[in-house]
Amino acid sequence: MTVLRIVAGSANPGLAAAVANHLGVEPDGCSLARYPDGELRPTVDKVCGADVYVVQPTAPPVNDHILELLLLLDACRRSRAARVTAVVPYFGYARQDRRTAAGQALGSTVVADAIAAAGADRLIIVDPHTPSLEAVFRIPVKTLTAVPTLCGELAAELPDKAVVVAPDLGAAKLAARYAAVLRGPVAIVRKQRESGVTVTALDIAGEVRGLPVVIIDDMITTGATIEAAVGLLRQHGAAPDIFVAATHGLLVHAAPSRLRDLNLQSVFVTDTVAPKQGIAAIRVCSVAPMLAAAIACLHNDRPLQESGADVR
Amino acid sequence: MTVLRIVAGSANPGLAAAVANHLGVEPDGCSLARYPDGELRPTVDKVCGADVYVVQPTAPPVNDHILELLLLLDACRRSRAARVTAVVPYFGYARQDRRTAAGQALGSTVVADAIAAAGADRLIIVDPHTPSLEAVFRIPVKTLTAVPTLCGELAAELPDKAVVVAPDLGAAKLAARYAAVLRGPVAIVRKQRESGVTVTALDIAGEVRGLPVVIIDDMITTGATIEAAVGLLRQHGAAPDIFVAATHGLLVHAAPSRLRDLNLQSVFVTDTVAPKQGIAAIRVCSVAPMLAAAIACLHNDRPLQESGADVR
Amino acid sequence: MTVLRIVAGSANPGLAAAVANHLGVEPDGCSLARYPDGELRPTVDKVCGADVYVVQPTAPPVNDHILELLLLLDACRRSRAARVTAVVPYFGYARQDRRTAAGQALGSTVVADAIAAAGADRLIIVDPHTPSLEAVFRIPVKTLTAVPTLCGELAAELPDKAVVVAPDLGAAKLAARYAAVLRGPVAIVRKQRESGVTVTALDIAGEVRGLPVVIIDDMITTGATIEAAVGLLRQHGAAPDIFVAATHGLLVHAAPSRLRDLNLQSVFVTDTVAPKQGIAAIRVCSVAPMLAAAIACLHNDRPLQESGADVR
Amino acid sequence: MTVLRIVAGSANPGLAAAVANHLGVEPDGCSLARYPDGELRPTVDKVCGADVYVVQPTAPPVNDHILELLLLLDACRRSRAARVTAVVPYFGYARQDRRTAAGQALGSTVVADAIAAAGADRLIIVDPHTPSLEAVFRIPVKTLTAVPTLCGELAAELPDKAVVVAPDLGAAKLAARYAAVLRGPVAIVRKQRESGVTVTALDIAGEVRGLPVVIIDDMITTGATIEAAVGLLRQHGAAPDIFVAATHGLLVHAAPSRLRDLNLQSVFVTDTVAPKQGIAAIRVCSVAPMLAAAIACLHNDRPLQESGADVR
Amino acid sequence: MTVLRIVAGSANPGLAAAVANHLGVEPDGCSLARYPDGELRPTVDKVCGADVYVVQPTAPPVNDHILELLLLLDACRRSRAARVTAVVPYFGYARQDRRTAAGQALGSTVVADAIAAAGADRLIIVDPHTPSLEAVFRIPVKTLTAVPTLCGELAAELPDKAVVVAPDLGAAKLAARYAAVLRGPVAIVRKQRESGVTVTALDIAGEVRGLPVVIIDDMITTGATIEAAVGLLRQHGAAPDIFVAATHGLLVHAAPSRLRDLNLQSVFVTDTVAPKQGIAAIRVCSVAPMLAAAIACLHNDRPLQESGADVR
Amino acid sequence: MTVLRIVAGSANPGLAAAVANHLGVEPDGCSLARYPDGELRPTVDKVCGADVYVVQPTAPPVNDHILELLLLLDACRRSRAARVTAVVPYFGYARQDRRTAAGQALGSTVVADAIAAAGADRLIIVDPHTPSLEAVFRIPVKTLTAVPTLCGELAAELPDKAVVVAPDLGAAKLAARYAAVLRGPVAIVRKQRESGVTVTALDIAGEVRGLPVVIIDDMITTGATIEAAVGLLRQHGAAPDIFVAATHGLLVHAAPSRLRDLNLQSVFVTDTVAPKQGIAAIRVCSVAPMLAAAIACLHNDRPLQESGADVR
């Protein structure tokens, strides 16, 4: 039987180590040379004949992490790995899944093609921004979800009758998935995005007055969407202790200070992206057990349902 | 300069003729042989060296129409058309863009691959069920929308302050696009789908009591989703004259009688799918002018914005 | 070692069950959802890590069966089957292997490309209309023949010195293969096809007067070709008890009544296509043992010659 | 408008010159370096932006001519030809279109893939051994036939009531095409091929006694098939003056002396293969006018029917 | 005739403007959105139906520039450009053209595949590190050289009898190309590379004592190779005024101070990479005239020799 | 575990037998039919389910050997080999890795594409003319080197302080690899190639007067390059006993007599190409042990470093 190998890219070695630990294997000592001109040259080891899982979320610096992922995949292929699975818990450029103005590219397709061309046989992703991301690929894609993991933590803290709030229409279906687990109602913010950075919330559909709320989203980038939703909720008389939950905590730019200023009860994210240190109220739930269970199933050619992995 | 040719498949020759008429050309006299065993053999004419647009929505019988489309594309390629654009105003299997249970296929990807393999250089679609359908393709896809066309008709009839109602969470973003044109508020039904045919509506987020409403969706298949929404809206005290608008009026099975029994004010659909005859209250708005304008731009290598075409 | 799985499409579940029975395995409980608008959504089970054989002849309704096959193949691939072999005993659109008039498509290539794009690793076919069908594919194709099976049954009933009659020039080489097994002479009808349905026989090359004859062909569709040959043979004084043998008994339209009216001695076909019930004189020989033997060889990576399978 | 260029490979420069002459253009001064170790390096000239037709039948030495063709196609592509059409009047390896024994390759597919990979956009072939050769390709293939050309010459010489004889079952359909033009009956030899070189004829279906005959085939290689047919025809009392016609006169090995010894009336072949000098009774009909007409249509994006080209 | 468009990526807009200026066209006002998380979203304009040249050297930050290039190419394709040529004067990752240790990737192939998959029809490069880089691509590649341009400037300043020095064996063939233009002898340094940054020169083959020298290379990255060669040359008694010439002046890290400390006579580089400001002794020769001439030829489908472009 | 099979093409059956012998297996009894018209039809045996290594250097007659290789690869694929590795110790057309004049092809890419299209999963090559040949392929390529093997033999005979001479600039890096093993200095001939056959040496960089020399190269074709280098060395006073070493001894045309006339001490080549008989002073070192060790590693999915194989 082929050997299982976890290759850790530089984007989130802590997650790779945790996954390997759950699986009872050593993560691969992949080394990464960075040349003075910025070119990367990773070297993989012991992948020959192995069933390899390359763990590399394409979080910021997103372009460096994408190139490193492509080189790692090519290195595994040329070193004669028996099978190469790209484990990309956070998949960058997923928002570029349609053109919203003339002259744009489809970043998600461009990245998907590059990953497939570099030699990935399969892909594992977690809560992609576009639920149909798997349809962009011809290689088999396993889409996992951190919603049950996050709900497990939320359930222990949320007051009864909490309303699940989608901070925009795009999150409405995700809110329904949270609500189904938490057995609560859904409210939806209808926002008008004014630029890439600023956001103005306008309206809220559903009852929140006097009720505890949890704002959910797939990712928190600058925190601007959360900030707008919190303002609107307070305006509409929601209960003061506001919770937030999202799978991917990118938390770039002013996000840490913005979240601190909002005085939130708790912000739950996972470690799909390497966690930032020292941000108050941030609670990190690990997806490592879920990824490990999924990888074990893939390695042993078992269906994923038999694992503890949460499949969307 | 290459000649423009409209090739009409058998799925909606009326639409093809209307498009050709707007463009001032004759639709192609493509003939379709149906063999006794059900095999199709279409023959195209005069496409040699031409810029060809094959008009063939993949409405029911969906599988026959898909195969006919593939054969038409291959025939154009092998007859040395200079360029072949598949015009598929209704794109079947678009809902199969993600796997919702183990063991399923991704029908949208399967059909997309077959269309590309058969030789389409470009694709035109209208209001696909999945907005990111274009990311599944490597060939350029032009996604048009009938929302402005439908809103033009709606605006003349709808009372003031009409609420745009999304009959499920998946339609929330589409409702926002209608609401932006109609300048009205949005309400959203959260439903629980119980089987492929039966639907149970549960709840409604947003105010509808005493207000005129228009239920919108991308397509009406059996009418069950509309029926559930109407029931819920009446339960919540919406104004009695209910409007419905959807791009694709498939209207299969009991849909005609179901819509009649609902006693709706008007049901607006387009002719992306060949219209059914004799269904009360159905009002058909043609997408032919929009398709013709888009084809004119593509043929003349002009950006679509310069046309009257409504691009999503 | 990987597990062997037989996945039965809806085109011929009886054949799949018989094949599975010969192999001592259970056929897979693949379920097929048919949506009200005609879209299909099959679900496969237990194929993860398995060596899967999808049994689906593309007999009428040919387009539905082709789409179902494509979806089944994609489902197996995405469910991480170790290897997927399409078993298509009757391969529709095989006659469209050349263009006989300007403006036509090559249906065989279109279908072949779609099958390969959907994820088939290998293909098994039986007596395709075009002997060189395998050259259209890049995936390995195993072409089996039912001629020895049919000759085994024929030999027990045919009088001595029976002449093998090809009902048109296209069947001449097939007739030679029958004649080699049956050790008889060959006669060939030269016909002029007047339309897709009507056929006029003109002439016969070779001696038939007073001799028993067996008309052979790869498939019987409407029975018109057989009807014309029978008329010509009787005109030329062949012995009254006429036999017919063909691998694929599609028997659409008026075929059953036509064959009955011809008052034939026996018509031998196989079960590559699910047999029609209640047609007098039809004798069905099963290809299940041959398919099972071939699948056993493929599964065990043994050459086919070691099996009892009849390879062309 | 793009310029038309005829690039002459080394396989049949005379044919290329004749084609160019009919089209009123100069053939391209392509030069071919042959290195001492047998490697070829052709250089093309003036193809930049042109509509290029590379004339190179893959006659013996077949492997050298195939490699030269691949290099010519790549050279045209990399020199930025607007469009490259491979004109391969005789297509070698076409007989390897099916595997007749375990362990064989499909030479026709291997060569087709190499041609497509080297950059051909389209292909022109004449009377390929397998009529469905075009289905092996994804690029558009134009299949021409020299049968009308040859029949034109034959008609002037053949006595009335001549029988068209297929020297084996594989030539039966071709014989019917000759017979349709010549308005004569068909007779068919059923042979048993004993080795690659020796052939034993067994039987003849159809009347030939006392009648003038013309043996037809797609190609004459060693002449052994013709020799066997002639022997059988004389045995069956055919009229003494026997005619032969075939598109491709490869005439390798003992073919010239064998044909001379048969004392035939006339042997008609075309110049798809560069004609051998000094073989008695050989009459060469040129396919240059037909190829020129076809190229003119392709260059001007006109359907082939409008030309004088004979399309199968 | 199609319109010529120059699209300027963000890597070297000055070069793009100079190229456009030479061609008498406006460079395209492509805008580049940089999202807070580092994702790029370029938007192209007016490329519909045009013959587009995307100017984007993949100099540092190399990974950002590669992703931007891929997105630009995809945007042009999806905006229906008639033809897209990637103009990548400096091609990053070209040194990764072979694996020098187990477990490595081939970065040049990975980047080439991504560029082709993103939709480039053709590529223009200048003095790539690997002369055979074009063989990695299936799309036509035009390899230009700045050697004549640099020699033109050098010739005006170099003393007579200057020796062209290759600073390592890999530069030996390039030195010969300089020497052929400058009509001087060649000397070659044999070095031992000790790490990615440090270099130790060992030996020099050829006469330099008392002679003026010009060290040449394809690129200057950190300046370490030049530093080692200068030391060795001074040790071997070369004339004091040392010249340096290289196509690509990356000049990262300590390169500027290192070059200053070497007290060189002049360092000639080109603007394939956007020039660094304020580095003493650096003389920048523009490749814009050469690129403009090449683009004019490609746009007009003329051979490159007719232009003033210097083709390798 | 899969069985290891060595398939011997006709180009060098002796090498295949030696490799098989080292591995303790029988070479496969592949038979090769040569048809009278020059078409090849190889038949493979017992490859079903096996891990197959096809040994076929593409030495002269290079085009025949390439076609045979393609057919062998296709035969293995279609016979369901588990994995097919092309072992091409000498890779023809490798010199065509760049275009040195307008209108040329890239022969190395053309052959690489044909090999990949024919079904090779992996490739093994030895000392290719272009060190970056592996970057042309998408399949994993293992590049071995015979330099250590040849140096082992050389070391036993060479006098102390021998100079390694590169006969042209293209061999400079290869000379450095020899010199690193032999611990000697390097001298480099700068030549001007005047035609494909004649060569004029001009100059020599590095000290050779009174010193023993070994001229090295990757291949010896006509011997002209060696002849020119020997003349120059003698002119510059090198010691009289001159050694020559090269991996590939093609030795076509006048090479044997030319080498004899040069009165060399010894000429070391390997058996990558089937050795010519009876050439004085030629010493053949076998690469069979190295190839066998590499194949053993590939078959057992072990890294190559653990073997005794010499990896470049």
Image: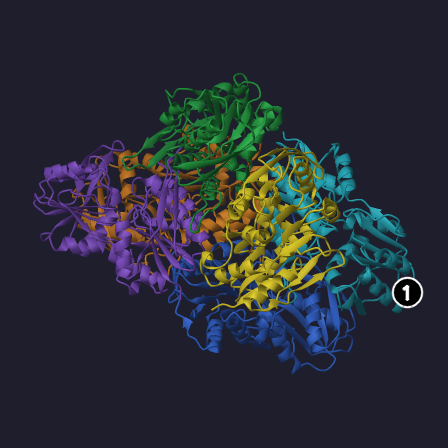
Chain colours: A green, B yellow, C cyan, D blue, E purple, F orange
In the image, E299: left or right of C155?
Answer: left
Q: Residue at 42% across / 54% down in the picture?
A: E121
In the image, E59: left or right of B10?
Answer: left
Where is F295 relative to C167, above or below?
above
- At mark 1, the secondary structure is loop
In the image, B285: left or right of E233?
Answer: right
Q: Position of residue D152 (x, y in %)?
A: 63, 79
In the image, E136: left or right of A304?
Answer: left
Where is A21 relative to E217, above or below?
above
In this rendered view, identify the residue nearer to me: D221 or B211. Answer: B211
Which quadrant of the rendered structure holds the C terminus of chain F?
Answer: top left
Q: Position of residue B194 (x, y in %)?
A: 69, 34
Query: Could you tell me if residue D117 is visible in this image?
Result: yes
> In which quadrant of the rendered view does residue E222 lie?
top left
> In which quadrant of the rendered view does residue D239 lie?
bottom right
Where is A81 relative to E26, above or below?
above
How crowded pointer 1 is (Cα within 10 Å; few <14, some 14-19, many 20+) is rated as: few
Q: Total number of numbered labels? A: 1
In this rendered view, identify the residue nearer to me: F223 or B163. Answer: B163
Q: Position of residue E91 (x, y in %)?
A: 32, 46
Query: Could you tell me if residue F195 is visible in this image?
Result: no
Q: Residue at 42% across / 70% down in the picture?
A: D3
Which quadrant of the rendered structure holds the N terminus of chain F?
Answer: top right
- Please report, as a chain letter, where disc 1 is located: C
In this rendered view, identify the residue nearer to me: E249 or D52. Answer: E249
Q: Residue at 11% across / 42% down in the picture?
A: E264
Where is F176 relative to F43, above or below?
above
Q: Position of residue A81 (x, y in %)?
A: 48, 32
Q: Mark 1 belongs to which amino acid?
A: Gly
Mark 1, residue position: C210
In this rendered view, identify the residue nearer to me: F312 or E92. Answer: E92
